[in-house]
Image (cartoon, rainbow, N blue to C red):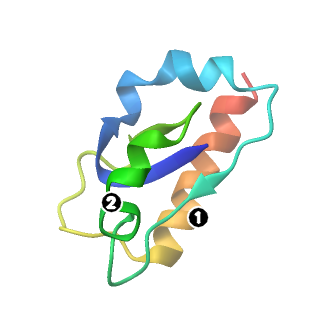
Amino acid sequence: IIFTSRKGKSIHKVQKYLEEIVSENILVVFGSPSRGIHEILGEKLHNVQRSQIINFFPDQATETVRLEEAILGTLAILNIQTRK
């Protein structure tokens, strides 16, 4: 399970994790336009096993990324990473 969040680890720091999950099914969880995953799940977020919280856009110049852009960008990055 991959949670997307600006508060997560930079995509650059989790390359090894992405390489390890290449052969597995991947579930990607996004926040809503008004609330991030930390606000939605709270403390339950840290109880999810076999998961990572990843910031796919660590150098973004805005506070938030629109959901449509986040979905397309994240899936493009994962597609490239899982084809290695």
Relative to 61, does residue 57 appear above or below in the rendering?
Answer: above
Q: Marks 1 and 2: in contact by CB < 8 Å?
A: no
Give the secondary structure at mark 1: helix
Amino acid at dot 2? Gly
* Residue 57 screen position, x and y as percent: 35, 50
Which dot marks residue 42?
A: 2
**Which of these two is toward me, 71 or 8?**
8
Q: Residue at x 36, y 23 (%)?
A: 13
* Residue 36 screen position, x and y as percent: 34, 68
**Which of these two is toward me, 58 or 40?**
40
Mark 2 or 1 closer to N-term?
2
Amino acid at dot 1? Leu
Compared across the picture, whether 54 is left or right of 74 comes to left
From the image, which quarter does the N terminus lie in?
top right
Relative to 17, does residue 70 appear above or below in the rendering?
Answer: below
Give the alpha-carbon distance from disc 2 to disc 1, as whole Å. Answer: 25 Å
Compared across the picture, whether 23 is left or right of 2 comes to right
* Residue 40 screen position, x and y as percent: 38, 70
Residue 55 in sight from this viewpoint: no
From the image, which quarter does the C terminus lie in?
top right
* Residue 4 screen position, x and y as percent: 44, 53
In the picture, residue 77 is in which quadrant? Answer: top right
Residues packed near mark 1 inside 10 Å, few (<14), some (14 to 19) or many (20 plus): few
Compared across the picture, whether 4 is left or right of 73 comes to left
The residue carrying mark 1 is 72
In the picture, residue 53 is in which quadrant? Answer: top left
Q: Nearer the viewer, mark 2 or mark 1?
A: 2
Which dot marks residue 49?
A: none
Residue 77 in sight from this viewpoint: yes
Residues packed near mark 2 inside 10 Å, few (<14), some (14 to 19) or many (20 plus): few
Q: Residue at x 55, y 21 (%)?
A: 17
Q: How many numbered dots are placed on residues in this image?
A: 2
